Amino acid sequence: MPQPEHTLPIDSVSSSNTLTVAFEKFANITQTVKEYCPRIRILVMGRRNAGKTTLVQMMANSLDGEVMIRNEEGNEIDPDNILQPSVERGRAHIEYEITYPSDKDYVFHDSRGMEAGSEEELRTLKTFIKDKQEKRFLNQRLHIIWLCLPVDNDRPLGQQEMAFFEHGTEGVPVIAVFTKFEWRVTKAFGQLRDDGKPLKQAREEAQVKALMDFVGIQRQRFANVKYPPAQFAYLRESDKSFGSCEELREITRQVVQNTVNQVLFSEIKDGDIEIAMAIALVQ
């Protein structure tokens, strides 16, 4: 059943209770996010073998991989044509909504445009993002972009992947998701052992060392890009059936809450000059 649309009741701003109701929404932002965005809409990007399919299944707590795909008209279609790594890029339709019966919190869109990097695919991507951001209701818009970047080798990020950060995303926050991070931990463990650290100590320190080493590389890579990621997430065990996604879940929640806050402020300010003045006094 389609979720009801929600906007702030701007047509009732003359009521003396409007400001109180508005600030109650800010006070209970978690509930407000669920009201305005019953499902967080995420565009998942990344080249082939970046761990996208496994990632969305993990986020949706899908034990069996059962998935539902709907096209632009809302009609259900065969999921085997969408997320399988063997399927050619041209059949990954970015408009299709991907959901999992095991989880009601997310709706995903899949894009494989980063792999080819052609001008046509870039235009398709930019048009999709722009069209989503022009939707009237917040729950119809795109809330987050996850760009999956596998780090299971020492090669730097590809030119096409880094070029993505030279293009705007219509204000949609981008989270750089470094997948297959367990390779970095294994490498750090080996370096610690080579340095003479005992086995137990090397195991205990490997994850911290891997993160510290990689953060230095990451900062250098993104230092001069025009549109850097809003946040970073580091995923271990992304090549297994289940791994830890809690960090990415929390980062995603926080970014969406910030977006909802901004929309609420904007809608209130645009609704009535007296309310705008009242908000200005507390900012």
Image (tube, grey):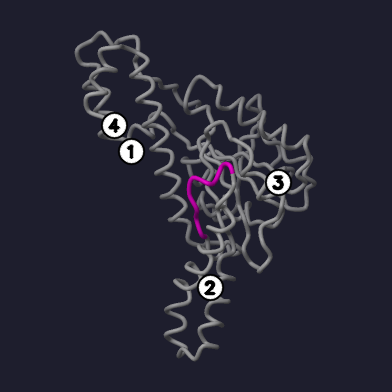
Position above or below: 112 against 128: below
Q: Earlier in the sequence, mark 2 or mark 4?
A: 4
- Given this view, does label 4 or label 1 mark the residue nearer the observer? 4
Camera-side residue: 78 or 115? 115
Task: Name the residue tied to disc 2.
Answer: 185
Q: Tell me where the magenta segment starts and ends, as one range.
A: 226-234
Going by the numbered disc 1, the residue's amino acid type is Thr
Position above or below: 238 against 36: below
Q: Secondary structure at mark 2?
A: helix
Disc 2 to disc 3, how far (Cα)? 26 Å
Position above or below: 116 against 94: below
Whole-percent x and y of residue 140? 52, 27
Task: Name the residue tied to disc 1.
Answer: 30
Going by the numbered disc 4, the residue's amino acid type is Phe
Q: Are marks 2 and 4 in contact (CB under 8 Å)?
A: no
> 274 left or right of 157?
left
